[in-house]
Image: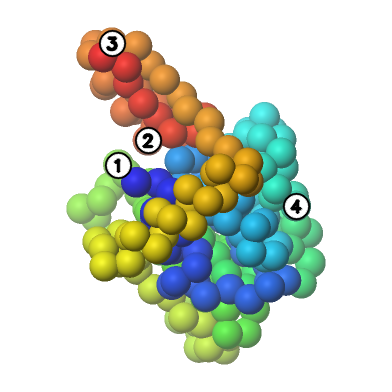
């Protein structure tokens, strides 16, 4: 349920205010493409992180102000700083890894981080996440970092679905799907998703 995930991750856990900069990783993916559009609808300042210039162009069509190509960036921290000149107020993290590090190093005082996914760690979920440690940064910024699971908001689904349907009927929400054909395509489609090669929601048509 990418729409519900985007809705609650952005509006409930992160609690952004109008005008705040919301950085979203995997911005052209199933959750990211919806989260960016909700950010636009609510008057936030959405900034995308995606894995190709084509994906970033799609994000801009959806209402993202600008974005960063994490695959071609030579300095991800600097590029996020350029894309977010006022800093990052809310980071919707669908990936973890180096993108998370870049966001943390650009996080504003009282910034909020919503951990939605950790796809960058897909080949080592059972191992410690070894990388930069941001405890001092978290202390100085008084940041709030919160894990997100959709099931925690089950009692609020009705309101969320009503909002999403209303925005869709008004033409305010678009989605893109990446459809593979046939049951034999499932393994390849799954690997493509793990590598970030899919564009939008990855589906397999049986």
Among numbered discs 1 and 4, the one appearing first in the sequence? 4
Is residue 49 among the parts visible in the rendering? no
In this rendering, the label closer to the viewer, 1 or 3 = 3
Among numbered discs 3 and 4, the one appearing first in the sequence? 4
Q: Which residue is mark 1?
A: 123
- Labels 4 and 2 touching (C-beta < 8 A): no
Q: Say if 13 sits above or below 131 in the image.
A: below
Q: Which residue is mark 4?
A: 65
Among numbered discs 2 and 3, the one appearing first in the sequence? 3
Q: CA distance from mark 4 to mark 2?
A: 26 Å
Q: Residues within 10 Å of mark 4 (few under 14, many from 20)?
A: some
- Labels 1 and 2 touching (C-beta < 8 A): yes
Q: Residues within 10 Å of mark 3 (few under 14, many from 20)?
A: few
Residue 52 percent coordinates (x, y): 63, 33
Residue 146 percent coordinates (x, y): 39, 73
Q: Residues within 10 Å of mark 1 (few under 14, many from 20)?
A: few
Q: Which residue is mark 3?
A: 182
């Amino acid at each position: 349920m990418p729409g519900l995930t985007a809705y609650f991750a952005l509006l409930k856990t992160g609690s952004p205010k109008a005008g705040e900069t919301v950085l979203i990783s995997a911005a052209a993916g199933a959750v990211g493409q919806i989260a960016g559009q909700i950010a636009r609808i609510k008057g936030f300042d959405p900034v995308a992180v995606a894995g190709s210039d084509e994906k970033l162009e799609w994000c801009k069509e959806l209402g993202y102000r600008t974005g960063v190509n994490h695959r071609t960036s030579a300095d991800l921290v600097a590029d996020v700083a350029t894309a977010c000149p006022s800093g990052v107020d809310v980071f919707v993290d669908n990936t973890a890894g180096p993108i998370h590090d870049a966001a943390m190093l650009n996080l504003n005082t009282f910034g909020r981080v919503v951990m939605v996914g950790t796809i960058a760690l897909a080949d080592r979920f059972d191992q410690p996440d070894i990388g930069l440690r941001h405890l001092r940064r978290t202390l100085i910024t008084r940041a709030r970092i919160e894990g997100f699971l959709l099931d925690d908001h089950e009692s609020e689904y009705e309101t969320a679905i009503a909002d999403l349907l209303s925005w869709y009927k008004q033409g305010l929400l678009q989605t893109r799907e990446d459809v593979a054909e046939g049951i034999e395509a499932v393994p390849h489609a799954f690997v493509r998703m793990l590598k970030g090669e899919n564009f939008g929601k990855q589906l397999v048509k049986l």
